[in-house]
Image (tube, rainbow, N blue to C red):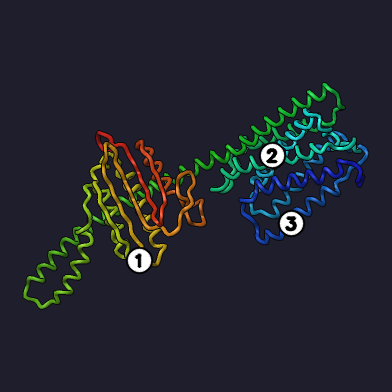
Amino acid sequence: MFDFSAPLFWYKLIFMAELLISEALATYTLKKKSRFALRAPLSVLGCLATAFLYPLLSFSYNAAYTSVMFFVLFGVTLVGMKMCYDETWVNLIFCGIIAYTTQHIAYEINSLVTTVFDLGDIGSYYGGAPTGESNPLMYITYFCAYFFTYWFVWAFIEYRIRRRQSLKIENLSLFFFCAVIVVIDIVLSTVVTYLPYSPEVKSYTAVIGIYNILSCGLAVGMLFSMLGKHLVEQELETVEELWKRDKKQYEMSSKNVELINIKCHDLKKQIRALSEGNRVIDGAALREIEEAVNIYDGAVKTGNDVIDVALAEKSLICEREGIDFTVIAEGEALFFVSSNDLYSLVENALSNAVESCLKTDDKKERFIKLYIRSVRGMASIHVENFCGKEPKFVNGLPETSKDDKDSHGYGMRSMQLISEKYGGGLKASYSDGVFTLDVILPMQTGQKSN
């Protein structure tokens, strides 16, 4: 049971360490339980202790027993992950399979290179006794195979897909299919490892190794395609909800602005009648009331009712918050954009600008500039605003500064999708404390859509 001279006895610990490192890379973005800093090292120690105590008897050195041993140790790591992370079993098994597959790909690459270039007998790990001295190149090959495989899966798959979303597995049938592929590959690899060495077996081992690498790589790609598809679906659902919200907000704001303008117009007439009458009224007080009323009546008229509604709302906010709001707009340039889409574009752009300005307490630094014009058959929306801290850009878009990135940051993505809908594009940039947003749309002929 404790044959310290057997390579397999020590390889149990090596395998467990490899698997734990791979699992750490696959799970670090998951929701952690309280006292994670204590739970994690205890779980690691428990997994390593299990690997150390796992029995190796005289009949243990065969493919069946070794395969079962690997899967039992894998199950122990799943229990350890459950102790550390506040996630469902499905999510943890998903991450575990990704980690195990990554470990197995690294193992197969190491075995393939070692076998093809005669660096040593990789099967000696599973034997009951050492088969001879190891070639130093085996250790270099081992390190490179595991390091670059782990790094590649993390940098190009796990990090890119997982950095902006929570883990959610919905396609369980595909998940189960990929898990079966991995199980077959691992068992098949173990069977081949125990075949007696010969030139024919060497060639056969190389072919099986290449097959295992390709099939496991395909399984990893399929598993993460589930997350990528879910990310796109989640993003589209969120943007569609934003569009519905903007539509309702525009309809409500349009009615409110129209009603307020009517009331303001009537109130101005009444003020004028009072001032021209014989009643004794403080003229300064009348002028103060009239100036307040003129906020709506004197708002910028762009020639586009949709833009006017959005500007009327933001003008009040800027007036209240001490934001210098400059507008030069040819509203007619955007006649071809539907009311809902146009309101979403302008409202989201200005809302982001206002939010950025409010992050500074110095009102002298607060400014927003909006320019809407047509140039050579292209309609342009240009927004500049104060931005005290350079935002982090992801795929050309600024990442939300809010902690809950799964629920925020879709306004900019919404504007990008709208601009692409009309065959245009969106560009965001930052320079010297100024955030700049440009939306370019090719002008279209015909009637505006609803």
Q: How far across and down, in percent of the image, does residue 366 sit?
A: 35, 62
Task: Name the kind of residue labelled 2 in the image.
Answer: Thr
Residue identifier under label 3 = 41
Residue 421 higher or lower than 268, as above or below: above
Which of the 4 image quadrants contains residue 169?
top right
Which label was assigned to residue 363? Answer: 1
User: Given contact means CB atoms under 8 Å apart, are the residues at marks 3 and 2 in contact?
Assistant: no
Sequence-first tag of 1 and 3: 3
Q: Secondary structure at mark 3?
A: helix
Give the Cα separation between the discs numbered 3 and 2: 22 Å
Classify residue 420 as left or right of residue 166.
left
Task: Name the kind of residue labelled 1 in the image.
Answer: Lys
Which label was assigned to residue 102? Answer: 2
The residue mark sitting in front, 2 or 1, is 1
Residue 235 higher or lower than 111, as above or below: below
Give the Cα separation between the discs numbered 1 and 3: 50 Å
Give the Cα separation between the discs numbered 2 and 1: 53 Å
| Residue 6 appears in the picture as rendered | yes
Q: Secondary structure at mark 2?
A: helix
Q: Residues within 10 Å of mark 1 (few under 14, many from 20)?
A: few
Q: Secondary structure at mark 1?
A: helix
Q: Residue at x 68, y 40 (%)?
A: 148
